[in-house]
Amino acid sequence: MSLKIGIIGAGGMLQYHQAGFVKAGAEVVAICDMSEAAAKAAADKYGVSKTYTEVADMLADPELDAVSIIVPNKFHAPLAIQCLQAGKHVFCEKPPALNAAEVREMIAVAEKVDRTLMFNFNNRARPESVDLKARIDAGEIGKINSAQSKWIRRTGIPGFGGWFTTQAMAGGGATIDLLHMIDLALYFMGYPKPTNVLGQTFETFMGDPRFKGPWGIPDRADGVTDVEAAAHGFVTFETGQVLSLQVSWAEMVKREEVSVVFQGTKAGGKVERLFREDGIDETAFDTLEIYTQDGEKPVDTVLEHPFCEDMGRIDSAANFVEALEGKAAPLNHPEQALHLMTIIDAIYESARTGKAVAL
């Protein structure tokens, strides 16, 4: 029998979760959204039989095996915990939660009820990332001593006054929203335990309509805009490895860039997505480069992969199903999410205090 999955949230990411679950052979049997109209419209579009406006009502369905959570960040932890306690496996959108303390609570509940908790770190499922991780696991890269993660936009603020720009709802701004490349760098590095974090955030251009992006939600004149537009940071690990990071919704850069550059003991390289137009996936192009040495001669290899417009979102959702069925190793583990959010928390604390944070 195929796994039966319910989805909480009828927004834009639903299309990828639904496609991934179906690709892996699962069945989406329910959609829950506060807006009954939105839930019904999504159900009609994807041929889903049941809709709900209350999560508790959906969780009461005995045939439901797992739940996917696609809602504003504030609700990730409480909904995940509610679903886990109802005996359901959980696949949650990024970020894992508002902070590390919430992730710690989510992990404790998942362990107590013996249910799987995974997150949509979809960039791990991009073809270039899959290829590079296989090379790392095969020993071709060696130990990655240092890496530089970057997700930067010149004009990418997701509106003003909505939940994206409200600290209480989102947990932060660009740093927590565009954490994917921080995660990807840590994934390639073996997710070492962080020891010290130095960070600085910048609010420059927040509130300036010239720096809004082509995605997000409509402005709310009565809403709150109290998060950062950009952040820079540096992380050290107990293994001696180091990571520098740059994230921005709005910063004076040439164009949007999504990348991890790394320096290993056997090879270096770069996974990169460049955008010709900020925020428009179909204008992007992806590369994987490997840097080695042939005697005194430097060798730079560019590896070709099929373009993945959805940035691995469909395969990431499919992996959740495959992991539950024992057909594939899970692409991520909750402890990694905890390390990631510990670093995010420390970036914000360092920016607030002006001091490095020892973990």
Image: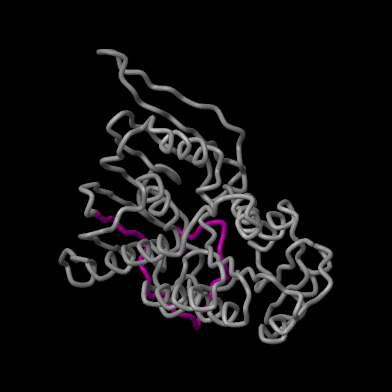
* Residue nearest the observer in this picture, 302 or 229: 302
Residue drawn 50% across the image and 48% down it: 124
Work out whether 298 lies above or below 243: above
Residue drawn 40% across the image and 35% down it: 270
Q: Give how far across and how far down residue 200 sits, in percent.
A: 25, 61
Q: Which residues make up the magenta segment?
A: 209-235
Q: Quadrant of the N terminus?
A: bottom right
Q: Quadrant of the C terminus?
A: bottom left
Q: Give how far across and how far down residue 225 sits, in percent.
A: 42, 75
Q: Quadrant of residue 229?
A: bottom left
Count of labels in the image: 0
Query: Is residue 263 covered in magenta?
Result: no
Q: Main secondary structure of the magenta part?
A: loop
* Residue nearest the observer in this picture, 96 or 221: 96
Q: Colour scheme used in the picture? A: one colour
Work out whether 331 lies above or below 82: above
* Residue nearest the observer in this picture, 38 or 32: 32
Judged left or right of residue 203, residue 161 is right
Query: Is residue 222 covered in magenta?
Result: yes
